[in-house]
């Protein structure tokens, strides 16, 4: 399965596994570099998903704040 085929949770789990393997320090250099490269791709994938989620949350909370403000202004009249 390629890194692009994973959902956020799967990509994060794989990234954590790769980090643990790299931190172990027992990998041959070439294998360690390959795993590092995979980790960078997974990191970018996770960051993209998180950035999109953050934007969605920002839009939703802005809309909610505006609706609450409109309700509050309506009650003041």
Image: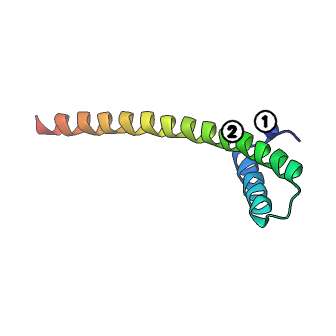
Q: Is residue 9 left or right of residue 35?
A: left
Relative to 22, say whether 10 is above or below. Answer: above
Residue 16 coordinates in the image, percent (x, y): 72, 57
Q: Residue at x 77, y 42 (%)?
A: 37
Residue 61 coordinates in the image, percent (x, y): 39, 40
Tag 1 secondary structure: helix
Relative to 43, say whether 56 is above or below. Answer: above
Q: Quadrant of residue 76?
A: top left
Q: Quadrant of residue 70?
A: top left
Locate the N terminus by quadrant. top right
Q: Is residue 33 left or right of residue 53?
A: right
Tag 2 secondary structure: helix
Please state which of residues 41 and 27 is positioned toward the viewer in this rendering: 27
In three-dimensional space, the C-alpha distance between marks 2 and 1, rounded to whole angstroms, equals 7 Å
Q: How many marks?
A: 2
Q: Residue at x 47, y 40 (%)?
A: 57
Relative to 15, say whether 25 is above or below. Answer: below
Relative to 17, say whether 66 is above or below. Answer: above
Residue 55 coordinates in the image, percent (x, y): 49, 35
Residue 77 coordinates in the image, percent (x, y): 10, 34
Coloring basis for residues: rainbow
Q: Which residue is mark 1?
A: 4
Q: Residue at x 88, y 50 (%)?
A: 31
Label 2 Cα neighbours within 10 Å, binned few <14 / some 14-19 / many ≥20:
some
Q: Is residue 26 left or right of residue 73?
A: right
Q: Which residue is mark 2?
A: 45
Identify the mark nearer the N-term, 2 or 1: 1
Q: Are marks 2 and 1 in contact (CB under 8 Å)?
A: yes
Q: Residue furthest left?
A: 77
Please state which of residues 11 and 70 is positioned toward the viewer in this rendering: 11
Q: Is residue 24 left or right of residue 46?
A: right
Q: Residue at x 75, y 62 (%)?
A: 20
């Amino acid at each position: 399965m390629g890194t692009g085929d994973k959902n956020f949770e799967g990509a994060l789990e794989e990234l954590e596994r790769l980090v643990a393997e790299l931190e172990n320090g027992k990998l041959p250099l070439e294998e360690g570099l390959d795993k590092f490269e995979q980790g960078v791709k997974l990191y970018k994938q996770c960051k993209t998903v998180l950035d999109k989620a953050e934007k969605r949350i920002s839009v939703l909370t802005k809309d909610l704040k505006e609706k609450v403000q409109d309700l509050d202004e309506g009650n003041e009249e």
